[in-house]
Image (cartoon, helix red, strand yellow):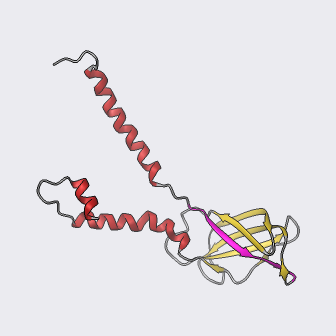
Amino acid sequence: MNYPFFPTRLLLRLVPLSLLLSTINHPLSTFAQGSAFTYQGRLNASGQPANGLYDLRLRLASDALGSNYVGGILATNGVPVSNGLFTVTIDFGAGPFTGSNLWLQVEVRTNSAGAYTVLSPLQQLTPAPYAIQAANATLATSLLQRQSNFTCPRNCLLGSSLVAAV
């Protein structure tokens, strides 16, 4: 049967194009979560809560003493501190978050003046930033294990049955 309103050639061109476009969009939608996290701190100056603008340098260490550093240094200038409290968004990228223990080293100085002072002790990163690793590895590993152990009963659609089995 010949349909004059929808030529076969056009259909043969649109199907591969739509499949290509759907595969391009897939990786973009799987990385909705970024690697940045929020650090809230308290800063004292001469025994009193600090106020004003401060420069911070942040580094990750693989030990509590800061003997071994992971990645580079992040610098934030002019961070507002009010009654000793401040908040910064930190993004070291997903690379350092491999599941091993990490500590955050914070160095501080008054806004663009003087040398940096290393604050102690280093702050151990707790599991919240490790959601990056969990999202990338744990779910994928779990789904692969379930999929490899899954047996599809007769007359089932693999996609819908796999979702129901998970």
Q: Give the side of residue 15 with respect to residue 43, left or right.
A: left
Quadrant (top left/top right/bottom left/bottom right) for the N terminus: top left
Quadrant (top left/top right/bottom left/bottom right) for the C terminus: bottom left
Q: Give the side of residue 110 with respect to residue 164, left or right.
A: right
Q: Is residue 122 above or below residue 149?
A: below
Q: Is residue 5 above or below residue 142?
A: above
**Is most of the magenta stretch helix, strand or loop?**
strand
Question: Which is more toward the observer, 88 or 113?
Answer: 88
Please report the residue visible at 16 percent of the width from the left and 54 percent of the height from the top.
156
Please tell me in which quadrant of the rendered image residue 107 appears: bottom right
x, y percent for residue 139:
39, 65
Q: Give the side of residue 20 with respect to residue 1, left or right.
A: right
x, y percent for residue 8:
25, 22
Please tell me in which quadrant of the rendered image residue 123 appears: bottom right
Q: Is residue 21 above or below residue 39?
A: above
Question: Which is more toward the observer, 121 or 52?
Answer: 52
Please report the residue visible at 26 percent of the width from the left and 61 percent of the height from the top.
164
Please tell me in which quadrant of the rendered image residue 109 appears: bottom right
x, y percent for residue 152:
17, 60
Q: What is the count of numbered marks? A: 0
Is-magenta flag for residue 32? no
Please report the residue visible at 55 percent of the width from the left and 68 percent of the height from the top.
96
Magenta stretch, residue numbers: 35-46
x, y percent for residue 5:
28, 17
Please report the residue visible at 24 percent of the width from the left and 64 percent of the height from the top.
148
Question: Which is more toward the observer, 111 or 115?
Answer: 111
Is-magenta flag for residue 36? yes
Q: Residue furthest top?
A: 4
